[in-house]
């Protein structure tokens, strides 16, 4: 009896998915936003856009995408670039491992695939940084393959449309959603179908205010019929975000400022920042900073003056960063924990690839110490020597 009802549910789900297909494509034809990466069929450009769009909003990505393609118009130009220039173009987008992986994958495509991206999802997944989602997006959008995509938008639309009440944080549920998306994508225009589903989630079936009246799936939607739109998808609370405190210093010596680079790999790997480090539990920020400078650079800081604090949220980590200016430091730099250091012009660090916390710390120091103003005065003095 139970097996029979499961079979009936499965076949009604399949019928619901079949009806959704043409509605989604018709809606997409009339409503798709005109986005730069939708005006091209170049797999390389689509790859760049899909990589940038992971964890990042469309509005933020648009100017980065344009600048990136202007500087690296094809796969060979990206593969031949040095990693630091790729990071520089990525500065401000966050999740820098994406830039590192793009660069490394471009080199693999040159070495192993004759300079052309493979057109099958399975082969794409062998490239660094290309997971199941990006492989599906690329294979379907750039190569017309019937490959599904599942991201946060797709999860929300499918969970509501089909009335899926299982926890979407569970891998079993996600795997079921991939199967459903896989069934939905089979047929003509798989790339457009995937984009329609994601577009619907981004613009109509949104997390807080689904506009069911404007939805092409509205007449057939389980959550809408059952009054469960606001309740779905169900996501149970996971482990709390970890709080971390750290301190950094603006250290100036003979008009140059000390910048340090983190080693590759790990959070913010390969990026430049002000020197400092994580505080230990209950450690006073100035004490912790002195300890970190001694341990990681062999420097002894004196006259630490607090400029303020900035906050930055990573996916599982909330960072509270205490920012100081050091009146003086003694000792020669002996690095341990950073892989490079430079004494830079005051505006030099901002020009090197750096992460969100450093961007915020520099903004705070600029405001707190009047640095831009002071820099302007220096420029004026240089231009008008007495
Ligand atoms: S009808 Fe409402 S809940 Fe259902 S898919 Fe459309 S927007 Fe989402």
Image: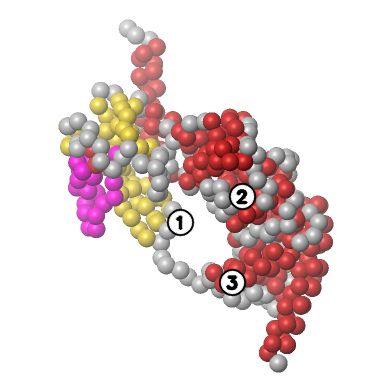
Indicate the secondary structure of the residue bearing disc 3. helix
Q: Position of residue 174 (x, y in %)?
A: 59, 68
Observer-nearest of 313 and 343: 343
- The residue where tag 3 is placed is 173
C-alpha span from label 2 to label 1: 26 Å
Is there any visible trace of residue 304 in the rendered image?
no
With respect to residue 236, does 131 lie above or below?
Answer: above
Q: Residues within 10 Å of mark 3 (few under 14, many from 20)?
A: some
Quarter of the rendering containing residue 358: top left
Q: Position of residue 179 (x, y in %)?
A: 66, 68
- Viewer-side label of 3, 2: 2
With respect to residue 47, does 350 lie above or below?
Answer: above
- Viewer-side label of 2, 1: 2
Q: Residues within 10 Å of mark 1 (few under 14, many from 20)?
A: few
- The residue where tag 2 is placed is 124
- The residue where tag 1 is placed is 315
CB atoms of marks 1 and 3 within 8 Å: no
Tell me which numbered mark, 1 or 3, is placed earlier along the sequence: 3
Observer-nearest of 334 and 348: 334
- Extent of the magenta region: 275-295
Taking the image as shown, residue 227 lies to the left or right of residue 52, namely right
The answer to if 57 sits in the magenta stretch is no
With respect to residue 243, does 118 lie above or below?
Answer: above
Is there any visible trace of residue 333 in the rendered image?
yes
C-alpha span from label 3 to label 2: 24 Å
Indicate the secondary structure of the residue bearing disc 2. helix
């Amino acid at each position: 009896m139970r097996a029979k009802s499961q079979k009936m549910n499965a076949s009604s789900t399949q019928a619901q998915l079949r009806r959704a297909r043409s509605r989604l494509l018709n809606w997409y034809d009339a409503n798709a936003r005109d986005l730069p990466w939708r005006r091209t069929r170049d797999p390389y450009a689509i790859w760049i856009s899909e990589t940038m769009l992971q964890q990042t909003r469309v509005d933020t990505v648009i100017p980065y995408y344009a600048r990136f393609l202007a500087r690296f118009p094809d796969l060979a130009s990206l593969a031949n670039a040095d990693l630091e220039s790729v990071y520089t173009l990525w500065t401000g987008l966050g999740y820098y491992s994406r830039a590192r992986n793009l660069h490394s994958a471009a080199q693999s495509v040159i070495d192993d695939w004759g300079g052309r991206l493979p057109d099958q999802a399975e082969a794409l997944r062998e490239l660094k940084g290309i997971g199941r989602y990006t492989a599906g997006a690329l294979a379907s959008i750039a190569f017309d393959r019937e490959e599904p995509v599942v991201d946060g938008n797709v999860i929300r639309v499918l969970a509501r449309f089909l009335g899926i009440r299982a926890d979407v944080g569970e891998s079993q549920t996600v795997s079921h959603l991939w199967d459903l998306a896989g069934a939905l994508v089979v047929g003509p225009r798989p790339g457009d179908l995937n984009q329609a589903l994601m577009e619907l989630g981004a613009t109509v079936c949104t997390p807080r205010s689904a506009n069911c009246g404007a939805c092409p799936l509205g007449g057939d939607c389980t959550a809408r019929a059952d009054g469960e739109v606001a309740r779905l998808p169900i996501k149970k609370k996971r482990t709390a975000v970890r709080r971390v405190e750290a301190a950094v210093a603006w250290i100036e010596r003979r008009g140059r400022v000390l910048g340090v680079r983190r080693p590759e790999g790990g959070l913010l790997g390969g990026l430049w920042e002000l020197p400092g480090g994580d505080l230990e539990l209950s450690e006073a920020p100035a004490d912790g900073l002195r300890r970190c400078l001694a341990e990681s650079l062999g420097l002894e800081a004196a006259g630490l003056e607090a400029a303020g604090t900035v906050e930055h949220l990573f996916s599982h980590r909330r960072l509270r960063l205490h920012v100081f200016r050091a009146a003086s430091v003694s000792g020669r730099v002996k690095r341990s924990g950073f892989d490079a250091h430079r004494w830079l012009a005051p505006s030099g660090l901002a020009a090197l690839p750096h992460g969100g916390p450093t961007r915020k710390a520099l903004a705070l120091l600029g405001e707190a110490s009047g640095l831009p103003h002071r820099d302007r005065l220096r420029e004026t003095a240089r231009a008008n020597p007495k």
